[in-house]
Amino acid sequence: MTSAPTNAASSQSNASGGGEDILVVTDLQKHFPIRRGLLQRKVGAVQAVDGMSFTVRKGETLSLVGESGCGKTTTGRMLTRLLEPTGGTILFEGRDITHISMGKMRPLRRDVQMIFQDPYGSLNPRHTVGTIVGAPFRLQNVKTEHSTKKTVQELLELVGLSPEHYNRYPHEFSGGQRQRIGIARALALKPKLIVADEPVSALDVSIQAQVINLLEDLQDELGLTYVTIAHDLSVVRHMSDRVAVMYLGKMVEIADRTPLYERPMHPYTVALMSAVPIPDTGRRTKRDRIRLEGDVPSPINPPSACRFHTRCWKAKEICSTIEPPLAELAPGHRVACHFPENLIDLPVPAVRADSPAAP
Amino acid sequence: MTTSPTLEGGDPAVRPGIGGFLQVKDLRVHFPTDDGVVKSVDGLSFNLELGETLGIVGESGSGKSVTSLSIMGLHPPGTAKISGQVLLKGDNLIGASREHIRKLRGKNMAMIFQDPLSAMHPYYTVGHQIIEAYRVHNNVSKQVARKHAIDMLGRVGIPQPGSRVDEYPHQFSGGMRQRAMIAMALSCDPELLIADEPTTALDVTVQAQILDLIRDLQQEFNSAVIIITHDLGVVAELADNILVMYAGRAAEYATAHEIFTAPQHPYTWGLLGSMPRLDRERAERLRPIPGTPPSLINVPTGCPFHPRCVYAELNGGACETDRPEFLEISPRHFLACHLSSQDRQRVWENDIKPML
Amino acid sequence: MITYIIRRLIAAVGLLVVVSIITFSIFFVVPRIAGGTPETLATRYVGRAATAETVHLTAQKLGFYDPMTVQYANWAKGIVMGENYDYGAGVERCPAPCLGYSFITRQPVWPDLLDRAPVTASLAVGASILWLVAGVATGVLSALRRGTIFDRAAMGLALAGVSLPIFFTGLVSLAFFSYTLGWTAPGGQFVPLTENPAQWAYSMILPWITLAFLFSAQYARLTRAGMLETMHEDYIRTARAKGLRERNVVIQHGLRAALTPILTIFGLDVGLLLGGAVLTEKTFSLNGLGKYAVDGIVSQDMPKIMGVTLLAAFFIVIANLVVDLLYAVVDPRVRTQ
Ligand SMILES: Nc1ncnc2c1ncn2[C@@H]1O[C@H](COP(=O)(O)OP(=O)(O)OP(=O)(O)O)[C@@H](O)[C@H]1O
Ligand SMILES: Nc1ncnc2c1ncn2[C@@H]1O[C@H](COP(=O)(O)OP(=O)(O)O)[C@@H](O)[C@H]1O
Ligand code: SF4
Ligand code: SF4
Ligand SMILES: [Mg+2]
Ligand SMILES: [Mg+2]
């Protein structure tokens, strides 16, 4: 893993070489105004996302993890431009799409697709599967090679459904099947980048594994790039090449999967991993846990400087006065903390000390 | 803590004399609907001692919630056809008068639910709701009940309970709401606490806090706890014994330790194999259970798992036709599967164990 | 909470202004747009027989030659502060709220309205209490006994109540209870509450029941639907899990939540009725605001119609305000943002 030269457009370095950047995000920001009082004056803002910088390489899976409300979905929706950022820039294949107009959005809609969390709410119950999966063709006026119907049926087969499902309605399907329908719809226009917001959270474990495998197969087959949003750290480890950890609208750590899970440096990441319940009774007593106190503070009045300092067990005076920069503490491993963990080469007890280095 | 599920109908596993604080015997809960009868729970048996934590795991729709609601007598009358026995200290709750069960609810057995926001009334303060729970069963003044409510809130780790007692649920965060629900459930010091997916709606760091809290309180109150979840990690944190349910039936019951180190049921293997695990090296590919969970209206004949089971053909057709009995295969380890013990051992040692 | 109340109050005042502008436009601007001149408007005040000279003078005195904005300002000022009408032969004081003089009777409208209002208010208040109690009780029982004979019968009756016109039910009940059985007073005999409460109730009972029948049908259906929904909420299950008595579960937890939307509709319905229950008043020959308005329409007596319109609009705005404030009382989520 070598550190590549900094991308001209971003202030950050691009970790391990290899694939070119399909997405370069710099200082991305989304503040939702809060209006109050008699005149509905703007009295503040929900700082849903506040200065995220990262790149996504072609063909990789980058995951965003963090607790509820930390801004994962908001980030995802900005990447697909379902939301307009209030600050920062997004470059997709070198093109600035940060404030791109509705009219110019069309080609973007073909290249960038989103899969949603809720396999029940995201499909129109009054439309057949054929209509739902075929909708992108109609919306974009795309002529398909054969008939739309044939193409849709091929898509259904690709995601492991049967072509006979064409005329059925969403309510006739199980959660896992519905998520497959959502995936087929996202794949219809052969996108380059897919933003998947909690694609498997609503599914049962056994079905979840089916969908994860499907997403991986499709990535290999079609050369897709994924930005996945998830809160389940085990799923994230399985699916991602790189992982970005978010806390209250900020990125606190980003690294390749293996170093992140084996040597998490940000105290929040360490706590997050320590909180994951492990299906092994033997761990009950052995694991030295780190328990965070309280809940995530409100993004309306986030704590000063390091936003994690109200819950951090390592916090010192400086943490509430000077914001720690997102610094590259190891090749490709960037952390925003004044007192990072695992800085020197120590085995990490948080998850698994004895796990061998990744291939 | 000697507990074991017992069986109905002259089964050899029924050993007279084995009591138990809570005994569920051949519980069946069927819902007549327009499409047919939904057999949500179909012949479920287990025992639970005071001081014990039982984890019930299974996929969504496997009948976990229906089971817990039946124990609490919370199915609205006329909706469900319930048979079998639920014995709480020998007192059969199935068929008991509604007033009798009402008096037990909250006092002897209490329940916490998945979504603490919707489970609390939006129009009443948190304190009011706890006070109400306490005063139904205790003839005390409002002031005394209020002091008790503040006390309970403090015990479940709510900061400044004296002022937060007068706040409304929407003013609490998700984790605090679940703490308040727990305070409400424990306000009458029940002997049985049922937690139905108590942390599913919470963040992982908050989940860890709540699991710690339940564990600590269980030790403090020495109550019997049933924790229902689809997350094997959560039961591993808490449960002494684990019951794996599939299609409204018990598939496997054993100590938590055995379920994770020597599971015997193909469905349990499937569950363990399909989840990505942080405590293992990352597998290149997950191994999902093929197919989808069964319809509970047309439950597959024989073993309900057979359409998804890769070992079904080892049993010469029995899996498709005969319902496997839930038998004690080794002390306190119960199993409903036709596989012979040799086959099971072989498959477990050769195919499954190396993969987990 | 304070800002909430102030916001609602300001909104209510704003709404009143808007309503007054609309009313003013209907009665003064639209006729001009439709081709009327200041003189044609003035004719209505002095009668067709008047000379062109008189008409012209009247139009001048009434300010019909002024720009519309000035006219509106004067008119609004009259309502708020009263007005002095100069008829040449002397100045007549029309005290606030000045809603003008009837073309026909030459009497100021406001005292007339004050006269009629008790009748309408008696009708609205009595009927609304009746229908709220009957409708909500029926709805709750229907929801709890869903699918039983009681439920079906109640909902069948409710359907009839919603679809039968008031003059039909009114006349039938008049014929039966009053003329045939002689149990209730015949129409048209209003006794003020202050005079004799018993007679007051006796005179109003039939209109109340008739009007309440119509409304309770609607309320029963609404309550039933609301209760069916809330009784499936998670917090109801929690209430039962606590071991609360079923009666408390239904009333304190179920009904409390189900009543909130009904409260809104109730407030608006009462507000609407306070402005006149045209059909009921007609059917029972009650001299209320509704009947007054109808008389105004029949005789093309604009100030009468305008007066009732304004008063009705006022009641609706006030009802709206009361409902909004009640909402904050009932739902803590509104109160505490
Ligand atoms: N339209 C909006 N108006 C105001 N605030 C918003 C809006 N959308 C999101 N937010 C706020 O922005 C923050 C981030 O929300 P977001 O949905 O991105 O979180 P998330 O990380 O996806 O959480 P989850 O894991 O619960 O899905 C939250 O505090 C949320 O309440
Ligand atoms: N009131 C009801 N009427 C009909 N079917 C029901 C009812 N309640 C639950 N079920 C069905 O019973 C099955 C088991 O449900 P449940 O116990 O809630 O599952 P879980 O294991 O996810 O908690 C499901 O198929 C569900 O649809
Ligand atoms: S900067 Fe300070 S408060 Fe923030 S994570 Fe690091 S040690 Fe904790
Ligand atoms: S009984 Fe047969 S189908 Fe069922 S789990 Fe055992 S082997 Fe599989
Ligand atoms: Mg989200
Ligand atoms: Mg459930």
Image (cartoon, rainbow, N blue to C red):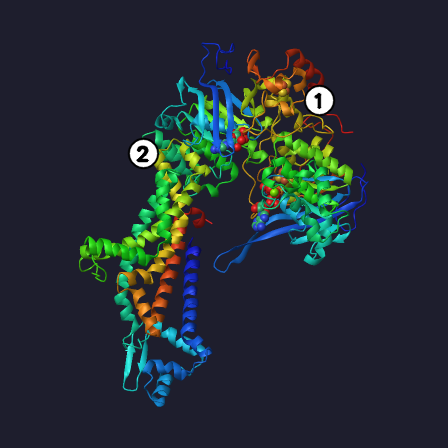
Q: Quadrant of the N terminus of chain A?
A: top right
Specify whether residue A305 is in view. Answer: no
Q: Which residue is mark 1?
A: B355
Any mark on residue C6, and which? Answer: none
Question: To which chain does the residue with label 2 belong?
Answer: B
The local crowd at label 1, few if under 14, some if 14 to 19, many if 20 or more residues have their Cα within 10 Å, is few
Amino acid type, callout 1: Met
Residue drawn at (29%, 74%) of the image: C108
The yes-or-no answer for disc 1 within 8 Å of ligand 4 is no
Q: CA distance from mark 1 to mark 2?
A: 60 Å
- Looking at the picture, tell me which residue is in the foreground, A294 or B328: B328
Residue C233: % across, % down: 45, 39
Task: Judge from the rendering whether residue C78 lies leftward or rightward of residue A313; answer left or right.
Answer: left
Residue B279: % across, % down: 67, 26
The local crowd at label 2, few if under 14, some if 14 to 19, many if 20 or more residues have their Cα within 10 Å, is few
Which is more N-terminal, label 2 or label 1? Answer: 2
Secondary structure under tag 2 reads loop
Residue C45: % across, % down: 33, 80
| C199 versus C109 height, above or below | above
The yes-or-no answer for disc 2 within 8 Å of ligand 6 is no
Q: How many marks?
A: 2
Question: To which chain does the residue with label 1 belong?
Answer: B
Residue drawn at (26%, 60%) of the image: C284
Closer to the camera: disc 1 or disc 2? 1
Q: Quadrant of the C terminus of chain A?
A: top right
Which quarter of the picture shows residue B211? top right
Q: Which residue is mark 2?
A: B141
| B186 versus A92 height, above or below | above
Task: Judge from the rendering whether residue A240 lies leftward or rightward of residue C320; answer left or right.
Answer: right
| C283 versus B187 height, above or below | below
Residue drawn at (47%, 49%) of the image: C337
